[in-house]
Image (spheres, grey):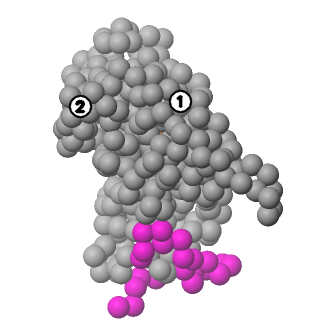
Amino acid sequence: MNERLVTTGADERERAAESALRPHGLEEFVGQKVVREQLSLVLDAAKARQAPSDHVLFSGPPGLGKTTLAMIVASEMGAPLRQSSGPAIQHAGDLAAVLSSLDEGEVLFLDEIHRMARPAEEMLYIAMEDFRVDVVVGKGAGATAIPLELPKFTLVGATTRAGLLPAPLRDRFGFTGYLDFYTPEELVQVLRRSASLLGVQLTAEGAAEIGGRSRGTPRIANRLLRRVRDWAQVRGSGIVDRSAARAALEVYEVDERGLDRLDRAVLDALCRRFGGGPVGLSTLAVVVGEEAETVETVAEPFLVREGLLGRTPRGRIALPDTWGHLGLTPPRDAPAGAAWQLGPEDGSDEGPQDAPGGSGAQGPTG
Ligand SMILES: Nc1ncnc2c1ncn2[C@@H]1O[C@H](COP(=O)(O)OP(=O)(O)OP(=O)(O)O)[C@@H](O)[C@H]1O
């Protein structure tokens, strides 16, 4: 089980549990209306031409359905799916081995495609466009490239960081689907479907309660459902209703907005200890007893998205909602969120308050 119930990633064990809940066709896939419609046009056109589909890229945060869609592409095309990932392809030879073993029409799914080694990326451009790889035999001046024809295949790439893909690779995908976070109503639909597959009795209120705490992410919704089901079986009536969801998620310390203990510790330190900031990331991390990287990559993206934390060039700041969420009253001199000059997206800059002993409790000057 994951240490954090609301983390967006999944380990091998969880992925195995997830496979039972995956939609098998586009009509079962909840939400992402635009992507579904665009993708179904691409696939229907390919089927009508009786040819492999164009290469497809899915981009979006973890747990929103990229792997599921890759599997759907293969099943809609009636083709086998071969899976690998960027981190597994560290040499051009690794990729040549995968590509040369494909059959005509097969779908190759490359997860985390942005993490592939550069020489392999370059080999992939040619393979995608010309269905050919150049295998280099020998070394130095005597090295020769032997072209190897490949069968026509469809590449499905998935990435959480489309911006990291070099333009020549991005341009070779005929279609890119951008996945967005799900609405609470869509998550209720995901939960209903999962509950029926798991044989769990789920009430409308129970689904709404879990959906609202799932951070817009089906993976988290399904994970919370499994934990609430456990609670309902052991301590409740077996039915997943609102009170079971509330009681179970209190045990797991997931609050009504989907924040867990780490998220709240960060906000609590920011408001109580540093008067709302700005405070540097590493100081904040020391106070909550975590690595700066964990705070930055695990807690912050969701807090920023929810408008509960701001990243500025001078450090992290509380926003008006932050105080309310913690049940605190902002100090009288706390600025309105808009008055702050918010920093760049990756805003990992350390503020001046990172100096040892800095309290960082002052407001902005401008
Ligand atoms: N639209 C959806 N409808 C129903 N279930 C979904 C949907 N999207 C995702 N899920 C479920 O959520 C879980 C995670 O989905 P998936 O593995 O496809 O996410 P991912 O985007 O590939 O994540 P990662 O980036 O970590 O690989 C799966 O159990 C899947 O069935």
* Element assignment for label 2: helix
- The x, y position of residue 81, in whole percent, is 47, 26
Residue shown at the point (27%, 27%) measured from the top left? 50
User: On the image, which quarter does residue 67 sit in?
Assistant: top left
Residue shown at the point (53%, 22%) measured from the top left? 16
Residue 38 appears in the figure:
yes
> In the rendered image of this protein, does residue 6 appear above or below residue 325?
above
User: On the image, which quarter does residue 117 sit in?
Assistant: bottom right
Badge 2 amino acid: Arg
Ligand 1 lies under 8 Å from the Cβ of mark 1? no
Span colored in magenta: 343-366
Residue shown at the point (31%, 73%) measured from the top left? 337
Report if the CB atoms under discs 1 and 2 are less than 8 Å apart.
Answer: no
Q: Main secondary structure of the magenta part?
A: loop
Whether residue 243 is in magenta: the answer is no
* Cα–Cα span, label 1 and label 2: 21 Å
Residue 186 appears in the figure:
no
Mark seen at residue 361 = none
Q: Check disc 1 and report the residue beneath it.
A: 102
